[in-house]
Image: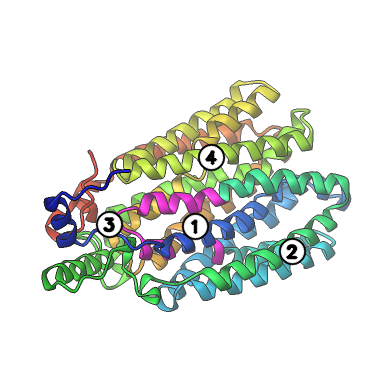
Amino acid sequence: MSISLNPNRLARRARVGVRRRRGFYGWNVVGAMFFGMFLVLGTRQSFGVFVATWEEEWGVTTGDISIAAAIGWIINGVSQPILGKIVDRYGGKVIVVISTIVLGVAYLLMAFIEGVLMLAVLFGGVISFFAGGVSPGTSGAVITRWFQRKRGVAMSVVAAGGSLGGLVMVPFLAQLMLATSWQTTFIVSGIIVLALGVPVSMLILRNSPDEMGQLPDGEVRSTDKRTSAEQRSRAQALMQGGPLGAERWTESFKSWPMWQLSIGYFVCGITTASISTHFVRWAISEDISQADAAWAFGILMGINAGGVILIGLLSDYIQRHYLLALVYLVRGVAFVSLIVLPGAMAMWAFALIGGASWLATVPLTTGLTADVYGVRNVGMLGGLINFSHQMGGGAAVLLFGLTFDRWGTYDPAFAAGALWLLVAGIVILTIQEKKYSIRYAPARGTATSPAT
């Protein structure tokens, strides 16, 4: 192993302060949020596994259960800006810890529900509200305070936790339900969340680098006056964001990027919520077994884990809005495959194509929001954008269920989803990222010089 002693290189590193501490704690925070997303998002995405069983046991329709699910998506959307504002003021740790405890207890109580009304109250109300505390919005608000240059890859690793959670938890819970009962499955889910999720969030999570005496990205705090001033300038720019950054979060609604990102995420909500709720039910209508459908959805999430990390790596070097538009368009192709291909072939095609795009929207959307508007209000802004996501999801879950009850097929709903994804891709392409992102503002000392 050779060690470079090039004096020019060493001097440059000392001057700009880009050396990193060994053991930068930000990656511990990434690991904790990854695990939280793995448990919470992975478990929540298993909802569709139980739909057919509840229909038979309770004597209700897909549309009836869809109402409870839709309420859940709407409540979750309402929770996002509320919890995001608390994160901005008090930090993310307290929200994550409390939410994880409540979710664990609520999953235990799910074993005792006896109908759609109780499902709507417990899952649609309590679980859905506190799931917002361990969500892409909350995790993004935490991670953006720890990272700037590697923000894309850090948030992608966290998002991959949700993907791997789907890969592991959905098939696991489906098999457990088939082997025991849906009640036992929820009891096991609650025990897992309480026994594993709560200790990890309590012991590892930290709100910001300041709590560990560190700087974003693990930079060494310099004693040199010039370098120290540059570091303070970068920290200030990180808080402020690009030219649209403002002290008050309400100012963001006077600019186009906030609306463009919200429209895209609204469509994202339509197309992810509908699938997470109705995918297994659709598969059963195509004479595919419940277990096979759960495995296909799990594989979709597994493929997405790799895809979302790749997207995150690329997003630190390529304009994020190009990648985000591509993700929406690829997902549109996946929706078309559900219409034009037969049964099992459609299921596996969707798993492969959809897997390349599923949660990849999360780090790109959160990263763009922080790049344009700064991290001062990123919890609130991310919560508002997530609100639009959940509103789209709530409407789609209900309408997809009513469509199936009315026509006995999901094809009209899938076609509408594909069309909306085309619209989202076009809208995102119109974002003027180079004009508004702090990444392209070298005069402020924070640009990462990504390629065009």
Measured from the top left, where is residue 239 in percent x and y?
28, 68
Q: Identify the residue shown where x is 76% and y is 49%.
A: 173
Give the answer, above or below, for where 275 lies relative to 90: above
Alpha carbon separation for disc pair 4 and 1: 15 Å
Q: In the rendered structure, which disc, 2 or 4, sits on the residue that comes first in sequence?
A: 2
Q: In the rendered structure, which disc, 4 or 1, sits on the residue that comes first in sequence?
A: 1
Alpha carbon separation for disc pair 1 and 3: 18 Å
Q: Amino acid at mark 1?
A: Pro
Image quarter where the N terminus lies is top left
**Residue bounds of the magenta highlight:** 133-161
> Is label 4 or label 1 in front?
4
Q: Residues within 10 Å of mark 1 (few under 14, many from 20)?
A: many
Q: Amino acid at mark 3?
A: Val
Q: Residues within 10 Å of mark 2 (few under 14, many from 20)?
A: many
> Is disc 1 placed on a helix, strand or loop?
helix
Q: Which residue is mark 1?
A: 136
Q: Amino acid at mark 2?
A: Gly
Residue 135 within the segment the image draws in magenta: yes
Whether residue 391 is visible to the viewer of this picture, yes or no, is yes
> Is disc 4 placed on a helix, strand or loop?
helix
Give the answer, above or below, for where 165 lies relative to 421: below
> Is disc 2 placed on a helix, strand or loop?
helix
Q: Does the magenta stretch mainly form a helix, a strand or a loop?
A: helix
Q: Identify the residue shown where x is 15% and y is 49%.
A: 6
Q: Residues within 10 Å of mark 3 (few under 14, many from 20)?
A: many
Q: In the rendered structure, which disc, 1 or 3, sits on the residue that comes first in sequence?
A: 1
Q: Which residue is mark 4?
A: 304
Q: Which mark is residue 190?
A: 2
Measured from the top left, where is residue 295 in percent x and y?
70, 37
Q: Is residue 253 left or right of residue 226?
A: right
